[in-house]
Image (tube, grey):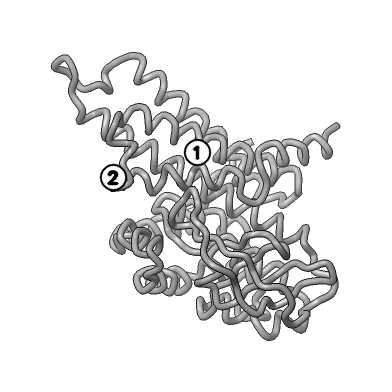
């Protein structure tokens, strides 16, 4: 089965790509890694104005959704441009807050970009807990509004700032639908990883076309062509899985999409690192912004093994 975007969805992707290209996201990512969020917040506002977060919020709460296919399209572009911030976590928060009371209080602000959210189980690390305005903690007795956060810890991806959420806080709902939040978070992560992998492949193809050895571009070497062809196949195999999962929104399909997209992005990162040579190892080179993100997304919201186990449970 082929999953093709319609004209409106393709135009949406192009508009996000143009906006993020003009925004110069690399500088925003580096600032965010240092704790300077001015550019990142401005970028967040523009993304929200484009309707990205509203796609995860029902219309009755001033959203445009739920529209998982369009959300997946958007997150591919966010991944391609390495946009920083708790993007997936805000989508997961919208899914957790669908109960009537919390929804009325919080969802409209999430849809318009006025709030940023992070989500974590009590005692575990939350992404960008220092930057989020809404910190949700999954405690033993339900979903709580965490009263604060602990110190920032280093992460494999410098732009993914990790903190522990403080225990306690207001109880929002005693029975949050965690499975629904996990479903949306995994879909968004899969799409984001697909975008990261595509960006790495694009940058690597450009690099091997410029880098010369023995008087010719290294991209003309058969071994290099084969390596990049493997990456291209992996990404093109993952793309319909991501779009198909956005259509069905079943746990098994979304888990399969996440496993495939994240492994494809990781394959793309390994090839990019090898084919860029020593420059690929330097944090100063912009390639590192995507390399570290590919590795971090691989285990975010479920490792490859956990996602494969989900698929096997549905198809024994």
Q: Quadrant of residue 203?
A: top left
Whether residue 74 appears in this view of the structure is: no
- Left or right placement of residue 38 versus residue 163 in this view: left
Image position of 22 with respect to 94: above or below: above
Report how far apart the C-alphas of labels 1 and 2 lie in the structure. 19 Å
- Left or right placement of residue 258 versus residue 34 in this view: right
- x and y percentages locating residue 285 in the rendered image: 28, 45
Image position of 54 with respect to 71: above or below: below
Residue at image position (48%, 59%) is 8
Give the label on residue 265, or none: 1
Q: Quadrant of residue 252?
A: top right
- x and y percentages locating residue 158 in the rendered image: 44, 54
Residue at image position (47%, 48%) is 293
Q: Nearer the viewer, mark 1 or mark 2?
A: 2
Residue at image position (83%, 67%) is 140
Residue at the outermost front position: 151
Instruction: Label 1: state its secondary structure.
Output: helix
Whether residue 260 appears in this view of the structure is: yes
- Left or right placement of residue 33 versus residue 193 in this view: left
Image position of 172 with respect to 176: above or below: below
Residue at image position (41%, 73%) is 41
The residue pinned by badge 2 equals 285
- x and y percentages locating residue 152 in the rendered image: 51, 64
């Amino acid at each position: 089965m082929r999953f093709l975007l319609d004209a409106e969805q393709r135009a949406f992707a192009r508009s996000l790509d143009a906006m993020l290209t003009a925004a110069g996201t690399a500088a925003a990512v580096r600032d965010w890694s240092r704790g300077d969020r001015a550019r990142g917040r401005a970028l967040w506002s523009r993304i929200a104005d484009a309707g990205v977060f509203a796609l995860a919020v029902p219309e009755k709460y001033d959203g445009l959704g739920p529209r998982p296919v369009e959300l997946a399209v958007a997150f591919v572009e966010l991944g391609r441009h390495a946009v920083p911030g708790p993007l997936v976590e805000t989508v997961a928060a919208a899914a957790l807050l669908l109960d009537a009371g919390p929804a009325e209080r919080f969802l409209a602000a999430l849809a318009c970009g006025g709030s940023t959210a992070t989500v974590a189980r009590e005692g575990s690390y939350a992404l960008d807990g220092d930057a989020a305005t809404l910190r949700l903690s999954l405690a033993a007795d339900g979903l709580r509004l965490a009263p604060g956060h602990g110190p920032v810890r280093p992460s494999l991806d410098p732009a993914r700032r990790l903190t522990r959420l403080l225990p306690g806080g207001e109880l929002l709902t005693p029975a949050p639908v965690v499975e629904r939040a996990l479903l949306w978070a995994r879909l968004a992560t899969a799409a984001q990883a697909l975008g990261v992998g595509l960006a790495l492949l694009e940058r690597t193809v450009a690099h091997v076309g410029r880098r010369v050895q023995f008087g010719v571009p290294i991209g003309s070497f058969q071994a290099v062509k084969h390596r990049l062809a493997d990456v291209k196949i992996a990404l093109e195999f993952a793309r319909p899985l991501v779009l198909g999962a956005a259509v069905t929104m079943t746990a098994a399909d979304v888990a399969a999409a996440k496993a495939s997209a994240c492994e494809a992005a990781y394959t793309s990162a390994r090839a990019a690192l090898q084919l860029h040579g020593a420059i690929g190892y330097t944090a100063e080179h912009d390639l590192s912004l995507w390399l570290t993100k590919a590795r971090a997304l691989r285990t975010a919201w479920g490792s490859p093994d956990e996602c494969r186990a989900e698929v096997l449970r549905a198809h024994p």
